[in-house]
Amino acid sequence: MKTIYLAFFASALVWGCAQGSSSSDTTGGGGNGAGTGGSPVVGAGGREALTTSSSVGAGPGTTSATTGGGTTSTTGGASTTSSSTSGGAGGSEYNTPVTCTSNVMYAGGNNANMRPGEACKSCHVLLGQATGKTFDIGGTVYPTAHEPNDCDGTGVTGATVVITDGMGADHVLPVNGVGNFYHQDLFGFAAFPLPYHAKVVFNGQERKMIAPQMTGDCNSCHTEGGTQSAPGRIMLP
């Protein structure tokens, strides 16, 4: 009887251990399952979050790419606009042949109509050939951009060149019948303060020089072909 009891007890103990072990495994498995289930869910959720984040990242990336494209497009547009503006600044009105529009050439004489288109201060300076009349500002206004030296310039009435000197004062110089304009500086004593800005005004319109100037020998740059970044002759607006 004692042997049967011991055998029964041992059997019950083994069954209990087996159940405990199974329960533990289940718990462990459940734990692992929860862990595994949790990990994939959390992991998947995390990955979904990452995917969402990646999607969000892709959104800005796409937006950024779009913005980049927009920027590039904008940059390309600005470049095109700049080119167009640049073309406008020195465009078709300067893309003209050399011609003497007036069909009248300087025939000689020392007066206000002399040598249109030539550099005034090659003579009208102290100790120059025309030292009796020294100019600090002088040039010729033409109807087109590429007109030869000694060709009479614009013959209109009422055109002026307005000089804004370095002190901000405006000085109006009339343009004469051959396009010449000038200012006598009385051997330098009455010279306009530098730098100056200049514009041609006619019939309610004006053509301005963009940059301030330190020399008033206008025709030395505004030659038939243009030098020192000048695109050609000084023209009416």
Image: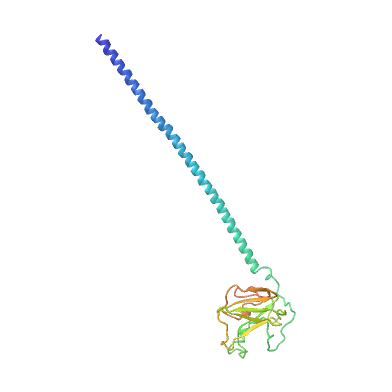
Q: Position of residue 19 (x, y in %)?
A: 35, 21
Judging from the image, the colouring scheme is rainbow
Residue 29 vertical placement versus 137 (above, below) = above
The residue that appears at 50% across and 44% down in the rendered structure is 54
Say which quarter of the image contains residue 107.
bottom right
Furthest-right residue in view?
103
The residue that appears at 59% across and 58% down in the rendered structure is 76
The residue that appears at 50% across and 42% down in the rendered structure is 52
Say which quarter of the image contains residue 5.
top left
Q: Quadrant of the N terminus?
A: top left
Q: Is residue 6 left or right of residue 159?
A: left
Q: Position of residue 95 (x, y in %)?
A: 68, 70
Q: Nearer the viewer, residue 146 or 4?
A: 4
The residue that appears at 60% across and 61% down in the rendered structure is 79
Q: Is residue 146 left or right of residue 75?
A: right
Q: Nearer the viewer, residue 84 or 168?
A: 168
Furthest-top residue in view?
1
Tally the numbered discs: 0
Residue 146 vertical placement versus 13 (above, below) = below
Q: Position of residue 64 (x, y in %)?
A: 53, 51
Q: Is residue 107 left or right of residue 209?
A: right
Furthest-bottom residue in view?
132
Q: Position of residue 185 (x, y in %)?
A: 59, 86
Q: Quadrant of the C terminus?
A: bottom right
Residue 58 vertical placement versus 197 (above, below) = above
